[in-house]
Image: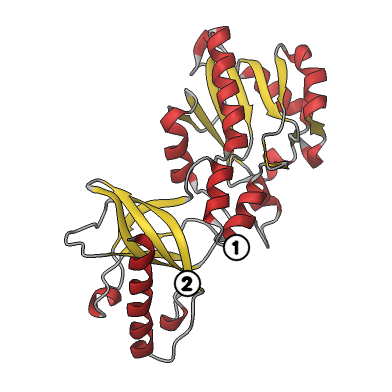
């Protein structure tokens, strides 16, 4: 998979594009249906497949004061898509200019990029004020030289799969339901960075991963498994939040890998959430916090055994 930061018709070349558009936050099974259909349409037409998405996500820009919880940051979306995703990922910067573009202007942009087929979900909307619906696009697509295909919703237990449903499941720590909606266990990913090493001083060395998102979809103390080079589902206990006892502000994922000896700094890890143990708490000092950490670690070991 190759990355574009703008719609450049010279990059995919004369083959043209089969494009699907959306935020694709979480890459759930509904998103997979769109991506798979774009790949199929590209193969049938001898075109290149493309996912067209945005950074920041449109709702993060349009509701900056209270953005929705972010399921996947850019690194996580890239890793999920590169496994069996499109030939191209085009990531457009979403800001004032793009938010004010009309539906017709956006269709013209797709035409100039070499779009031959556009694949959208039934609830798709774009253009200033959301003026362009899926049906609106299908009616006007031929005038811009491409066909528009509308993919029906993917349902589980009668409910349409959406990023909002995944957020609800994670907020309740219902990881089994989240996994059904996603088609995989929910994970977060990032590169381990150096912290204050307070955990090491307290006997709980942690791998610290910064959260590149304004709102977390879940928080608390959790039983997890850690994946990465040399690590295949390593059992761990993790803290996800702002660490109120030490006056933390920045959201951070800290994972204590049980019985692990080695250096993880700079390594990219994927943390798989298995069960929530409790909410974050503010302790009156480090001693009661350490006592609770021992209890949390014991509980996580039992769950993961």
The spot of residue 89 in percent (x, y) is: 50, 30
Q: Decide: is 164 above or below 204.
A: above
Classify residue 101 by image quadrant.
top right
Determine the secondary structure under disc 1.
Answer: loop
What separation in Å lies between label 2 and label 1 (alpha carbons)? Answer: 19 Å
In this rendering, the label closer to the viewer, 2 or 1: 1
Q: Dots 2 and 1: beta carbons under 8 Å?
A: no
Name the residue beneath numbered marker 2. 242
The spot of residue 162 in percent (x, y) is: 66, 44
Classify residue 22 by image quadrant.
top right
The spot of residue 179 in percent (x, y) is: 52, 47
Residue at (75% x, 31% y) in the render = 122
The spot of residue 139 in percent (x, y) is: 82, 19
Q: Residues within 10 Å of mark 2 (few under 14, many from 20)?
A: some
Q: Earlier in the sequence, mark 2 or mark 1?
A: 1
Classify residue 217 by image quadrant.
bottom right
Determine the secondary structure under disc 2.
Answer: loop
Q: Nearer the viewer, residue 209 or 80?
A: 80
Residue at (48% x, 28% y) in the render = 85
Query: Would you say 34 lies left or right of 82 here?
Result: right
Query: Would you say 207 lies left or right of 96 here?
Result: left
Q: Decide: is 209 above or below 139.
A: below
In which quadrant will I find the C terminus?
Answer: bottom left
Q: Residue lying furthest left in this view?
A: 261
Residue 172 bears which disc, if any? 1
Q: Nearer the viewer, residue 245 or 231?
A: 231
């Amino acid at each position: 998979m190759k990355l574009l930061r703008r719609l450049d018709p010279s990059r995919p070349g004369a083959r043209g594009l089969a494009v699907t558009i959306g935020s694709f936050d979480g890459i759930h099974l509904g998103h997979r249906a769109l991506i798979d259909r774009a790949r199929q349409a590209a193969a049938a037409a001898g075109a290149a497949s493309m996912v067209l998405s945005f950074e920041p996500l449109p709702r993060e820009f349009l509701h900056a004061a209270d953005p929705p919880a972010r399921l996947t940051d850019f690194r996580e979306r890239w890793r999920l898509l590169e496994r069996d995703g499109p030939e191209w990922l085009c990531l457009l910067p979403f800001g004032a200019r793009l938010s004010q573009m009309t539906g017709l202007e956006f269709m013209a942009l797709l035409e100039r990029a070499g779009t031959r087929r556009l694949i959208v979900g039934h609830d798709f909307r774009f253009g200033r004020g959301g003026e362009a619906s899926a049906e609106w696009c299908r009616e006007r697509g031929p005038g811009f030289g491409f066909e528009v295909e509308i993919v029906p919703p993917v349902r589980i237990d009668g409910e349409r799969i959406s990023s909002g449903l995944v957020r609800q499941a994670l907020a309740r720590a219902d990881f089994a339901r989240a996994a059904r909606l996603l088609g995989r266990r929910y994970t977060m990913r990032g590169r381990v960075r150096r912290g204050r090493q307070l955990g090491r001083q307290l006997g709980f060395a942690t791998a610290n991963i910064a959260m590149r998102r304004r709102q977390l979809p879940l928080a608390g103390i959790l039983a997890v498994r850690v994946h990465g080079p040399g690590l295949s589902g390593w059992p761990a206990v993790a803290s996800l939040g702002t660490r109120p006892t030490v006056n933390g502000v920045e959201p951070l994922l800290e994972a204590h890998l049980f019985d692990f000896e080695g250096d993880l700094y700079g390594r990219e890890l994927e943390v798989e959430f298995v069960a929530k143990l409790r909410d974050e708490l503010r302790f009156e000092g480090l001693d009661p916090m350490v006592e609770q950490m021992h209890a949390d670690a014991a509980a996580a070991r039992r769950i993961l055994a």
